[in-house]
Image: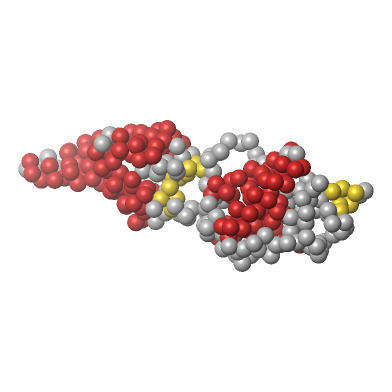
Amino acid sequence: MSELVTGEAVALELRPAKVPSRALAVLLDLLVAFVVYAAVSIAVVAGTSSLDDAAEAAVAVALLVLVLIGAPVAVETLSRGRSLGKLACGLRVVRDDGGPIRFRHALVRGLVGAVEILGTLGILACIASLASERGRRVGDVLAGTLVVRERVPADGPAFLPPAPPWLAGRFSGLDLSGVPEDLWQAIRQYLARMRQLDQQVSWSMSVRLAGELAERTGAPVPHDVPPAAFVAAVLQERQARDARRAFGAGVRGQAAGPWPVAGPWPSASWPGAAVRGPGVVWPDGGAAGPEAPRTGFVPPA
C-alpha cells in the first residue's frame, strides 16, 4: 500500500492519488468549465453586441482566462483543495506537509496547469506524475502541494498492538523529522503482522527496525526497552503529534491513531516476553507490571 503519513497531516492517513484518478478528475473539471464557458459566452455575446471586434476579442480572452484559471483557483481555495472533479473522485489537494492549501498554492497550480495540462493536452502533466514517487505534476512541485485520496478501501485498519503504558511520553523529545515514510510503513506492517511471525524472525525484524529508527532519530534504543516496544512507542508518539496538529493540543498520546486506549500489556505477542501462568515474565525473569523492567532485554532462545 502506498501510504503517506505526514508530520502535520489534516487527515492522518493520506494516500497519494494516482494518474488515472487524477486524469478523470481533470476531465470532469474541464467538462464543467466548458459548459460554464459556453453558457457565459452566450450571455456575454448577447450583452456586448454593440462592441467593436477588438473589444469583443478582449472580452472573449478575459472570459476564457477567468473560466479556465480564475474559477478553478477560486474553487480550490474556498473548498480547501476540492474541485468538482476531485470531489467526485474522492481526491483533495493538500500541501506537501499535509496541511490545507491556501490561495498562493492554488494560484501556482492554476497558472502552471494552464501550460502543462491545457497547453500540452495533459502530456507533460502525465509524464511528470508518472516520474514522481508521489504522483506530483510540475504545478504540484512548484506550489509545494500533493493530491491525495480521501476515500480509501473499507477494509478496516490493521490492529496494531498498543505500546506499554510505562513508555507513554518517554520519547516525546525525539526528533522524528528525519524518519522516512517507508520506514514508518515498514514499522506499521511489522506491528500488524508481529503475532503471525516466527519468534526468532519477529525478534530479528524488531531489532533491525529499532536500529534504523534509532539511527534516524539520533537516539539509541534504551537498554530496558525491547525493540518491538520501542518502535511501537515511537510510532504512537508520531501519531499523537499528528493528532495534536490536526485536532488541537488537547488530544493525548494514548488515544491518538489506531492505538487502543486500553488493553492487556505486556502481551506474549511481543518478542522478548514469555507467558508464565496468568501473567507475563520477561526473559530476565522479572515479572510484568506497570513499571518498566529494571534490567536489559535479551533475544528469545
* Residue 143 picture location, percent across and down: 36, 52
Q: Is residue 52 visible?
A: yes
* Residue 274 picture location, percent across and down: 84, 48
* Residue 47 picture location, percent across and down: 17, 42
Q: Is residue 199 above or below residue 235?
A: above
Q: Is residue 89 above or below residue 163?
A: above
Which of the pair 272/138 is nearer the observer?
272
In which quadrant is the N terminus drawn? top right
Relative side of 110 to 212, left or right: left
Relative side of 57 to 29, left or right: left
Q: Residue at x 63, y 54 (%)?
A: 211
Q: Is residue 298 above or below residue 36?
A: below
Residue located farthest toward the bottom when viewing the structure as drawn: 173
Residue located farthest toward the right when viewing the structure as drawn: 277
Which of the pair 175/236 is nearer the observer?
175
Residue 33 lies in quadrant: top left
Q: Is residue 247 visible?
A: no
Relative side of 188 to 128, left or right: right
Q: Is residue 247 above or below residue 138?
A: below
Q: Residue at x 77, y 42 (%)?
A: 199
Q: Residue at x 86, y 52 (%)?
A: 280
Residue 244 lies in quadrant: bottom right
* Residue 25 picture location, percent across and down: 40, 36
